[in-house]
């Protein structure tokens, strides 16, 4: 399937893949009904148009048609997921990375500052609550407000490119149908993007709190010096097992590179924490 959207059938194929990204198998009549809902039940997609688009998807190896049921193939599942990630930003990569990074760095700074400054448990808890809550709230607001603005501007740019590509279609009737269907699709995408950014903001805030409070809890519960060693080891585990591996998996960058980048950031944070703690 070409990335360039050239005609009505390409638009229908994208819509079909987006619908199938939520359920890998669907009844043909239900699929037709979902597309009609996108068109506000106006006749903008004829049965023949849908059948041709499905036939092209089947020939490209993206779907299989079994009687009245349509099902994604393994390749189709990947392509469907790619379109969903492109248009809906459904993969919370940045949110998880930001949450794990901010939570780990913040907890490390609190723990080391508390240890070198010999803060009491109450002061450490107060500092942890105040600092991590501030970081989590900041992450939530940043991803919610900034994420919505960025994602909507990006899908507007994608729609503009698709509209430009469709405008070259010499068939005026098909061109108008294509643009109308695409308009309805992106109207729906705008609503979905706003919902997705709320989820992203919540994921980032919760990940920040998890990565931050867990090591601090270990530091407060265990006796000295085991509390420091165990909490720092836990932060190291979060960095290596979760953050570095997650970044390596999602970006397809070798683990040793993502681990080195992450460790450099953590060492800078550690050095800053030691300076702050010894100056108190």
Image: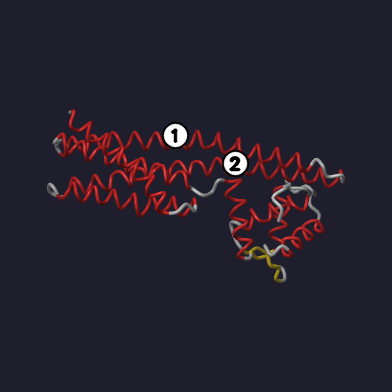
Left or right: residue 129 versus residue 50 is left
Q: Position of residue 264 (x, y in %)?
A: 34, 42
Q: Quadrant of residue 33?
A: bottom right
- Residue 168, compared with residue 77, is above or below; it is above
The residue identified by callout 2 is 191
Residue at the spot x=64%, y=55% of the render?
19
Residue at the spot x=23%, y=31% of the render?
276
Q: Position of residue 162 (x, y in %)?
A: 72, 42
Camera-near label (2 vs 1) is 1
Left or right: residue 175 versus residue 113 is right
Residue at the spot x=80%, y=56% of the render?
49
In the picture as drawn, the residue positioned furthest to the bottom comes out as 67
Left or right: residue 190 versus residue 3 is left
Q: CA distance from mark 2 to mark 1?
A: 18 Å
Left or right: residue 277 versus residue 99 is left
Query: In this figure, which colouring scheme has been used for the structure?
Result: secondary structure
Residue in the foreground of this view, choosing between 268 and 178: 268
Residue in the foreground of this view, choosing between 198 and 153: 153
Quarter placement of the C terminus: top left
Q: Quadrant of residue 112?
A: top left
- Numbered disc 2: secondary structure: helix
Q: Which mark is residue 165?
A: none
Q: Position of residue 258 (x, y in %)?
A: 41, 49
Q: Residues within 10 Å of mark 1 (few under 14, many from 20)?
A: some
- Numbered disc 1: secondary structure: helix
The residue identified by callout 1 is 141
Quarter placement of the N terminus: bottom right
Disc nearer the start of the sequence (2/1): 1
């Amino acid at each position: 399937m070409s990335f360039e959207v050239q005609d009505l059938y390409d638009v229908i194929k994208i819509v079909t893949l987006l619908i199938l990204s939520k359920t890998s198998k669907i009844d043909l009549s239900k699929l037709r009904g979902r597309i009609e809902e996108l068109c506000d039940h106006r006749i903008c997609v004829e049965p023949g148009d849908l059948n041709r688009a499905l036939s092209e998807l089947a020939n490209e190896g993206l779907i299989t048609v079994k009687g009245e049921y349509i099902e994604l193939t393994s390749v189709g599942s990947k392509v469907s997921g790619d379109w969903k990630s492109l248009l809906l930003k459904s993969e919370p990569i940045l949110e998880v990375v930001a949450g794990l990074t901010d939570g780990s760095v913040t907890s490390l700074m609190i723990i080391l500052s508390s240890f070198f400054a010999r803060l009491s448990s109450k002061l450490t808890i107060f500092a942890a609550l105040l600092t991590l809550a501030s970081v989590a709230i900041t992450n939530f607001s940043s991803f919610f407000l900034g994420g919505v603005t960025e994602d909507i501007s990006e899908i507007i740019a994608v729609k503009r490119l698709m509209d430009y590509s469709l405008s070259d279609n010499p068939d005026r009737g098909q061109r108008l149908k294509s643009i109308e269907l695409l308009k309805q699709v992106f109207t729906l995408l705008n609503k979905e993007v706003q919902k997705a950014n709320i989820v992203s903001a919540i994921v980032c805030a919760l990940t920040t709190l998890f990565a931050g409070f867990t090591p601090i809890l270990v530091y407060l519960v265990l006796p000295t010096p085991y509390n420091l060693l165990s909490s720092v080891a836990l932060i190291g585990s979060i960095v290596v097992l979760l953050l570095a591996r997650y970044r390596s998996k999602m970006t397809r960058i070798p683990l040793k590179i993502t681990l080195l980048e992450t460790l450099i950031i953590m060492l800078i944070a550690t050095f800053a924490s030691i300076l702050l703690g010894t100056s108190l």
